[in-house]
Amino acid sequence: STKSGADITFNLPTPATDPAVADLEAYRVKVNGAPVSYLVADVDNRKGTERVNMYQVSAFNQEGRQYTFSTVTDAIDIWKPSYQADGTYLMPNGEVLSDAAGAPLSSEATDLYNANIDDADVAERTTIILASTDTDLPDKFTRVSVLPSGGMGMGEDEEAQPES
């Protein structure tokens, strides 16, 4: 439980085959986006006293290396095509797409983005998805800290405890 009373549970990492990330992973593959590691959190804020946005999760291996997970919308921003002044779309890999090819991918990215800007209001239970550009994760983490609320350097880390 967080200091404000929210219960947050997750598996680290969540497999890319998890149904909760199916739409995200399908989009990533479609646009040839760089793979990510996912973290799907069940945020139960029914006993909480403040909003939870799961801004960041940091996991550490035995050697002290930090693996950072942030909101999956950060990954969507990296994967999506960018609209150019000449009416084309530029993919992150440098490929230029026509408006006809790029616009639907951009629209799909916007829909995914909007579907994943979730937070858990007081009394709400929801799923929040995070992602990390680190895909070579260790088998075991020695410490995990969660920034349940805040963002942009604001908020307070809280230690996560294994369920077992």
Image (tube, rainbow, N blue to C red):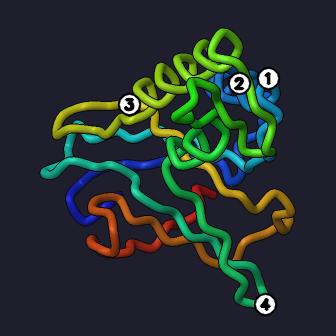
Question: Position of 138 compared to 76: left or right?
Answer: right
Q: CA distance from mark 1 to mark 2?
A: 5 Å
- Circles 1 and 2: CB atoms closer than 8 Å: yes
> Which quadrant: the C terminus?
bottom right
Location of residue 31 by image quarter: top right
Q: CA distance from mark 4 to mark 1?
A: 36 Å
Residue type at the position of mark 3: Thr
Q: CA distance from mark 4 to mark 2?
A: 34 Å
Residue 10: x and y in percent read 57, 47
Within-10-Å neighbours for mark 4: few <14, some 14–19, many 20+: few
Between discs 4 and 3, the one toward the N terminus: 4
The residue lying furthest to the top in this view is: 100
Residue 114: x and y in percent read 40, 26
Q: Nearer the viewer, mark 3 or mark 2?
A: 2
Within-10-Å neighbours for mark 3: few <14, some 14–19, many 20+: some
Q: Which residue sits at x=61%, y=77%?
A: 143
> Which quadrant: the N terminus?
bottom left
Nearer to the camera, 81 or 158:
81
Q: Which residue is mark 3?
A: 126
